[in-house]
Amino acid sequence: MRAQAGYEELFHRHASNPILTAADWPYPAHTVFNAGATRLRDGTTLLLCRVEDRRGHSHLCAARSANGVDGWVIDREPTLRPDPDRYPEELWGIEDPRITFVEELGKFAVAYTAFSTGGPGVALALTEDFSHFERCGLIMQPDDKDAALLPRRIDGRFALLHRPMTDSGAHICISFSPDLRNWGGHKLMLPARKGGWWDANKVGLSPPLIETPQGWLMIYHGVRQTASGSLYRLGIALFALDEPARCLSRGDSWIFGPEAPYERDGDVGNVTFPCGYTLGNDGDTINLYYGAADTSIALASGSVRQLLGWLDEHGHG
Ligand code: BMA
């Protein structure tokens, strides 16, 4: 691994990375990556993993572990399969889930990418147990992805972050809904930068926002196009609690990116792509679950306090 001399390490890779690969799967799977994450009431860590088969199509499969690191119990068959007969937007698979527990509903909301002829769009499903799912269908037209719901209403409305593709690039937006089905009030939240920046032209939300007393902490990915492909790295920004479209602070440098061999090499090399995190019992440790090179699932941990401290020092409005 290349040394990153002089830079503060905000996330530390787990020694047993990658923690989950296709070899762990109880049924044929080509790759497992980009997992949503949550903790269940009894403290169990649940990952909703993106599993790609040899058709190139993805579905979602739940893996549960008491410590969030090993001892994974993986569903014997796909947990949430594409259902193109009833939901044609899922023709070529469902990908990259982000999980939010919504206290008001007593349910988990899973926002995922539904992939079909029109391109990738955003779909939403609700579940109490990760066994039965109530689909809300397509809630953001293609081309749109990287979506996650906020855990509670803002000014009486549910709020969803997502990343529509536009002529001026791919920027993170927020939209609002009274009922999780009808969405409007779209606002730009975090634009991609331009030119030579690591996060020029294309950014997207990574895991769901993290609520802190200082604001909503966002971990986002920036995609840099290079002569040898794309580089997926992570940056952070902070948004006002009562007005999440308002950016309080954004860091200029990326804080995490592909360095380890399993992040550099794989089906799509140089990709670190988290879709979920869990918080430790101390309320500060953040366990970030990320897809490595579109091939496996890896874990890195950090501290919310330290991320906020870094933004205080290095971020600006
Ligand atoms: C993005 C998404 C991710 C994927 C990444 C790298 O556009 O499709 O699912 O991990 O590209 O291939």
Image (cartoon, helix red, strand yellow):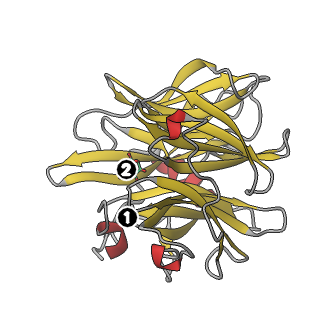
Q: Residue at x 57, y 38 (%)?
A: 85
Q: Position of residue 316 (x, y in %)?
A: 47, 38
| Mark carried by residue 49 | none
In the shown orientation, is residue 34 left or right of residue 1? right
312, above or below 35, in the image: above
Relative placement, left or right, of 17 versus 244 is: left
- The answer to the question of whether label 1 and label 2 lie on touching residues, with beta carbons closer than 8 A, is yes
Q: Can you tell which mark lies on residue 253?
A: 2
Q: Distance between the residues labelled 1 and 2?
A: 10 Å
Circle 2: element type? loop
Give the x, y percent position of residue 105.
84, 40
Residue 245, percent from left and from top:
58, 27
- Judging depth in this view, the residue of 19 and 112 nearest the camera is 112
Q: To which residue does mark 1 refer?
A: 7
Q: Sort mark 2 into few (<14), some (14-19) or many (20+) by Cα contacts within 10 Å.
A: some
- Left or right of residue 226, residue 117 in this image: right
**Observer able to see residue 246:** no
State which quarter of the image contains the N terminus. Answer: bottom left
Examine the image and state in which quarter residue 282 appears. Answer: bottom right
Give the vertical position of 235 relative to 8 (above or below): above
Query: Which amino acid type is marked by label 1?
Result: Tyr
